Image (spheres, rainbow, N blue to C red):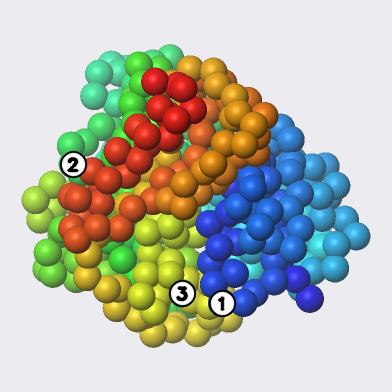
């Protein structure tokens, strides 16, 4: 039997499955060359990247498939009820719809964090009278492209007071009662005038110090006790000195798979499945050194030329002839190094080299 992976981009989850010998098929928006090589079958769902998955798209992609379970990634936060559509085909291996809905509802999450005594920005559904110092975010949005400075009220958006700090994410595995941290990563934006908070990349270690890491591990534990999260999840924060504010929870595996999975003895696929079964697994210690991943965006329209040779450190490799509009993702670049700073510098240079090779800069 085969496990299905359904996500806006399924390549990182497919790589995690492949590392432990799991057979998988992938349903995503890209069907990139390396995803097809990792999976038994890869099904591209057109239209979901711009407009999100729909019941019709999911049923069309999964109907008649002989699969034993479904692992999902990004793409369901805005409409968690779609997870029930997946369950029509096979058991869903992840947080159930009601838990995803609870942690992605901005006011419910703010109330939960307040009850736990965890610091977080002021959050509201109505726009503030004076927008200065406030951000407007789309409910269920991901990747930072939906975040903008607060303005007039708009459907499906909420408002969060802007706070200072360095973006940090805590990857953890949960069994519905407890959490165990896997790793801490720092993140950065690849800003444009229209999208000042567009996700750029991530790097580990985050350099937080043992004391703050212990506090954040306790915060993850408290969140799991309050919400019932299972499997792999992440807690996103802004950190300033020894202080922090919780920004959001991602109730599924995310972008940091690329810097944690396969690092030394660390294999994230079995940790995810163990947590879903209600088992809190032991987490191998990551080896020393830095690891970084960065998303590369097209600075202008471009086409992948015939015979283009993707380097080994590039992932999410589009096929020859693929056309990208300005701002579209081109690929992901990965780099290990002796330190986090060197790893981040390396992926930034890798991104420049890819765009130069494609004639985009």
Residue 324: percent from the left, percent from the top?
58, 25
From the top left corner, tell me how far across and down residue 4 is, in percent.
71, 63
Q: Look at discs 2 and 3 and give the one toward the viewer.
A: 3
Q: Residue 262 lies in what quarter of the image?
A: bottom left
Tag 1 near tag 3, CB within 8 Å: yes
Residue under numbered circle 2: 165
The residue indicated by pointer 1 is 20
356 sits left or right of 28 in the view: left
Q: Which mark is residue 267?
A: 3
The kind of secondary structure element at disc 3 is loop
Residue neighbourhood size for the residue with mark 2, other residues' Cα within 10 Å, grouped as few (<14), some (14–19), many (≥20): some
- Residue 224 is marked as none
- Apparent side of residue 205 relative to residue 310 in the rendered image (left or right): left
In this view of the protein, which residue sits in the foreground, 123 or 268? 268
Which element carries disc 2, helix, strand or loop? loop
Report whether residue 187 is seen. no
Residue 359, how many percent across, how many down? 46, 22
Residue 34: percent from the left, percent from the top? 60, 52
Front-most of 23 and 123? 23
Marks 2 and 1, Cα distance to the nearest angstrom? 37 Å
Nearest-to-viewer mark from 2 and 1: 1
What residue lies at 55% left-to-right and 46% top-to-bottom? 316
Residue that extends furthest to the left in the rendered view of this protein? 241
């Amino acid at each position: 039997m085969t496990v299905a992976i359904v996500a806006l981009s399924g390549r990182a989850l497919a790589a995690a499955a492949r590392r432990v010998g799991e057979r998988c098929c992938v349903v995503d928006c890209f069907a990139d060359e390396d995803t097809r090589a990792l999976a038994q079958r890869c099904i591209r769902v057109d239209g979901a990247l711009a407009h999100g998955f729909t019941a019709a798209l999911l049923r069309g992609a999964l109907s008649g498939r002989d699969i034993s379970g479904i692992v999902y990634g990004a793409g369901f936060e805005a409409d968690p009820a779609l997870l029930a559509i997946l369950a029509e085909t096979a058991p869903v291996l992840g947080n159930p719809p009601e838990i995803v809905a609870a942690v992605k509802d901005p006011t419910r999450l703010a109330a939960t964090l307040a009850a736990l005594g965890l610091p977080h920005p002021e959050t509201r559904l109505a726009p503030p009278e004076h927008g200065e110092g406030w951000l407007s975010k789309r409910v269920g949005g991901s990747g930072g492209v939906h975040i903008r400075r607060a303005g007039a009220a708009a459907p499906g958006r909420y408002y969060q007071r802007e706070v200072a700090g360095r973006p940090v994410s805590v990857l953890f595995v949960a069994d519905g009662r407890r959490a165990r941290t896997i790793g801490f990563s720092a993140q950065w934006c690849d800003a444009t005038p229209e999208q000042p908070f567009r996700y750029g990349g991530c790097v580990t270690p985050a350099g937080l110090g043992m004391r703050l890491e212990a506090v954040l591990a306790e915060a993850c534990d408290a969140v799991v006790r309050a919400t019932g999260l299972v499997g792999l999840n992440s807690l996103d924060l802004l950190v300033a000195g020894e202080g922090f504010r919780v920004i959001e929870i991602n109730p599924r595996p995310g972008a940091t798979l690329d810097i944690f999975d396969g690092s030394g003895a660390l294999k994230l696929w079995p940790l995810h499945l163990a947590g879903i079964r209600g088992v809190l697994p032991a987490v191998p210690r990551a080896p020393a050194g830095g690891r970084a991943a960065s998303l590369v965006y097209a600075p202008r329209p471009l086409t992948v030329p015939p015979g283009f040779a993707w380097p080994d450190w590039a992932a999410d490799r589009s096929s020859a002839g693929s056309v990208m509009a300005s701002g579209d993702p081109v690929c992901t670049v990965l780099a290990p190094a002796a330190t986090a700073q060197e790893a981040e510098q390396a992926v930034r240079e890798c991104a420049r080299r890819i765009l130069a090779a494609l004639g985009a800069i």
